[in-house]
Amino acid sequence: MNLISRKWWLVIVPICIFGSGWACGGGNGNSSESSLTAPSNLQAMVISSIQINLTWTDNSDNEDGFKIERRTGTGGIYDVVSTPSANITSWDDSGLIQGTTYYYRIRAYISDKDSEYSDEVSATTSNTSAIIPVIPAAPSGLTATVISSTQINLTWKDNSTNENGFVIERKTGLSGTYAQAATVGVNVTSYSDTGLSAGTTYYYRVYSYNSTGNSSYSIEVSATPMSIRDSWIPTSTGTNVPSGRHSHTAVWTGTEMIVWGGSEFNSGSINTGGRYNPSTDSWTTTSTGVNVPSGRSIHTAVWTGSEMIIWGGSGSIASGSLYLNTGGKYNPSTDAWTATSTGTNVPEGRYYHVAVWTGTEMVVWGGYGGAYFFTTGGRYNPSTDSWTATSTGTNVPLVRDLYTTVWTGTEMIIWGGTSGDSTGGKYDPSTDSWTDTSTGANVPAGRNRHTAVWTGTEMIIWGGWGIIGFNTYGALNTGGRYNPSTDSWTATSTGNYVPTGRVWDDYPPAVWTGTEMIIWGGHDGSKIFNTGGKYNPSTNSWTDTSTGPNVPSARYSYSTVWTGTEMIIWGGYGGPDIFNTGGKYTP
């Protein structure tokens, strides 16, 4: 039997379908559709009788742009009406016809290749010319930038044209609850959040609003303000900043620095001042009303816990009194002055004296009165507005000015001064008695116009003007640590990073941070400095202070306070400039 061999052939016929371009058989005629993702969430919002605004979500990261197509009515034909560039997610369609329905679709493109279309949407323009109120678009691009240990700056993008403003909400910590922190006006895209706590993480979100309602929230952002070590931030020179001055005083209240008095070029001694809040970087003027003391410089000031007491100082020739024995108590909560007593036991008028606050009394001592230097002083009790003379008996120190003083908690220690020796004394107000300070081993060389701080256990003195060679005087870069409990001295390092020798012509501006003494500024008789150093007594070592961005101009006869986290310096003399500027230094 013959077997007939048969063969079969499979013929493949391509089937092509026309959609958004030809696609045939097992392939796609538009290869870019697999690499371009179509935009989504297309929305059309009627703005007025002649305008519809579109928004969409960009789902691709490689498009050249978008093609927006529009048709009029259900039977219309789509035409491309706009081609926004890459990453754009909104478009305003204006110049439309009242009461007309428009249909829209959009797709992304690369070169001549297109993605698939988005869903189709439609909207009908109104029959009136009035603008239809709509909720504003949400802000985007929210950022939070740490500016200092107490400030975070926010910025965002305004995506709406019809907002009345923006609301900033803040919470503390991840599990905190959001609450309104501030509102800002129309078109504002930034906000500075001040008065914050270092080391705390703050979270923020922002929304826009108008009379119709609120937008959705922006993204959430967070930031943690931290002290930027060894850095300067300038103090405000804006509203209410006091006039430039030198030889003024400053105290720290716990929240504000109060500066007062001092001397100007043209008007001499002045009786104005200001309260500086570092958390808001703002100034408030002090009263010049009832009982404000007369203008003066080279006076003293102490903080009692509720009042600043100023006393003594140099007045003006015009006032008829160069050596003042008057003063005033300033209460910042009421912005009011009360005069200090000039009655029984008030000390003689003087300047270049010193003052400390004991917790109940202000003790003033020494100084210069025109004809002579003083070894006298007084204890002022603000609660009774009365004076008690300090002892001039056994062990009272020699006459002097331009010396330093510290309060230990039980005693006032004075040291150095114009006498040019290295003597001093400890005054105990509870017994009204004096005790000499040691002049034995390691006592520093005699000097004046130096600086001093109290550490809690020791007095540290440094710098000043003294003998640097045979019959030669100059600025010193030496110092010593005095322990009153052992009546002994330890020399401070003159090794690596010790600052250049310098003096301060008025009251010494050093501060104690809790671990270090910071000195800054001053002059050496020929050069004025904007440099400084941090001295650590536990390691007997020095570290430079920054001379980088925002370091204040070189100066002396300025004021200084320590806030607990920052050293604030302000005012002073820079030859020939008198400053109303300053800086906050974070060590």
Image (tube, rainbow, N blue to C red):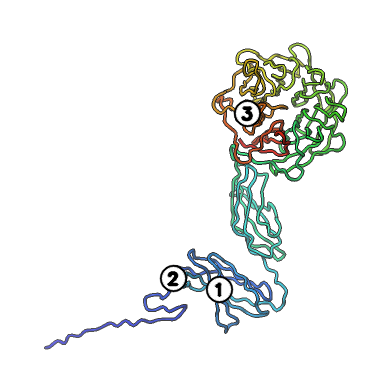
Which mark is first along the chain, 3 or 2?
2
Percent x, y of residue 236: 71, 43
12 displayed left or right of 145: left
User: How far, Cα to Cα, is label 2 from label 3?
Assistant: 69 Å
Q: Quadrant of the C terminus?
A: top right
User: How far, Cα to Cα, is label 1 from label 2?
Assistant: 18 Å
Percent x, y of residue 444: 63, 18
Q: Is residue 58 above or below residue 29?
A: above
Residue at mark 3: 517
Q: Quadrant of the N terminus?
A: bottom left
Residue at mark 2: 32
Name the amino acid type tagged 3. Met
584 or 550, nearer to the observer: 550
Q: Are marks 2 and 3 in contact (CB under 8 Å)?
A: no
Q: Is residue 183 above or below residue 244?
A: below
Report the residue at 55% width, 71% height from top: 83
Please, which residue is most extreme toward the top here? Answer: 394
Q: Residues within 10 Å of mark 3 (few under 14, many from 20)?
A: many
Residue at mark 1: 68
Identify the element where label 1 is drawn.
Answer: strand
Identify the element where label 2 is drawn.
Answer: helix
Q: Are marks 1 and 2 in contact (CB under 8 Å)?
A: no
Q: Residues within 10 Å of mark 1 (few under 14, many from 20)?
A: many
Name the amino acid type tagged 2. Ser
Which mark is first along the chain, 3 or 1?
1
Report the residue at 80% width, 22% height from top: 379
Q: Residues within 10 Å of mark 2 (few under 14, many from 20)?
A: some
Report the residue at 76% width, 39% height from top: 242
Percent x, y of residue 381: 81, 25
Please, which residue is most extreme toward the bottom here? Answer: 1
